[in-house]
Amino acid sequence: MKPYAFACVILCAVLFFASCAKTDIQQPDNGPDIRTPAINNADPYDELITTECSIHDFIAAFTAQSIYGQGTLAEVDSCMPIECLRFPEGGTLYSIHKVREGGVLYIFYDTRLFEQTNDLQDATILRWFYVQKNLSSDDYKDAQSIKDIAEIDATGEIFENIYYEDMDRWSADDYRFASWHYVSDGIYEIAYEYKNGELKIFHSRLLTDFSLENLYEPTSDECTAKIWEFDWVNE
């Protein structure tokens, strides 16, 4: 073989092996990977959920505009992956999230837009409930302020923080601040008034049918936040 031919063979071999060894090949950018969570009404949430979210991150991301929560199921999923999604027959769509600070977060969704578009990601947040332990409305009967509530239920501290972070809004005459608590016998709602430097309880009610009535924006829509029995927090 002539010298220049031999050199060409060697060069081709080097280029071939170099191309095979290259690992940083750039894949084409096809945009964000949009995943639609699957509805699962059978498996225990402990078997489905592998990641934890922060309740503080959720509050910061989804309650700034509305204390009830604002955003779509797709936005929730992109922020904290939805690994457990339930849709009871005749009930309300909800997701369950394990919380880093302890307990679970239930998020209920309005499916009217989803029913129009047939895209589950368009479902919008209807209400959220943070639950660390199983309680009943009787556990709150002696509380007189939000600080008392916070000692019973971690949700009280979450709502207290929400109030003081936007005190000008909630202390206005046309607003009454409230917290809600998911308990074994219903949804327990507590209304407060700011008096003598403290949020004092002036009214409470128990919604035994778990109805999602909106205190600030009354609606005639019938919607309940009833979860499957096996979805109650097990801590």
Image: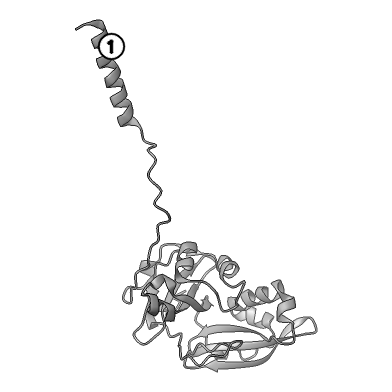
Q: Position of residue 177 (x, y in %)?
A: 67, 84
- Residue 156 image-quadrant placement: bottom right
Q: Position of residue 194 (x, y in %)?
A: 75, 84
- Left or right of 109? Residue 153 is right
- Left or right of 181? Residue 25 is left
- Image height of 78 relative to 116, above or below: above
- Which is nearer the eye, 164 or 7? 7
- Which is nearer the eye, 133 or 170? 170
| Residue extending farthest top | 2
- Image height of 188 relative to 106, above or below: below
Q: Secondary structure at mark 1?
A: helix
- Which is nearer the eye, 223 or 159? 223
Labels in figure, total? 1
- Residue 11 image-quadrant placement: top left
| Residue extending farthest front | 116
- Left or right of 88? Residue 54 is right
- Residue 3 image-quadrant placement: top left
Residue at 58 percent of width and 70 percent of height: 59
Residue at 40 percent of width and 57 percent of height: 33
Q: Position of residue 174 (x, y in %)?
A: 71, 87
- What residue is shown with label 1? 7
- Using a 10 Å C-alpha cutoff, classify the residue at mark 1 as few (fewer than 14 neighbours), some (14 to 19) or many (20 or more): few
Quadrant position of the N terminus in the picture: top left
Q: Indicate the colouring scheme.
A: one colour
- Image height of 196 relative to 44, above or below: below
| Residue extending farthest left | 1
Residue at 34 percent of width and 85 percent of height: 89
Q: Position of residue 171 (x, y in %)?
A: 74, 82
Amino acid type for the residue under numbered disc 1: Ala
Residue at 46 percent of width and 85 percent of height: 225
- Which is nearer the eye, 136 or 225? 225
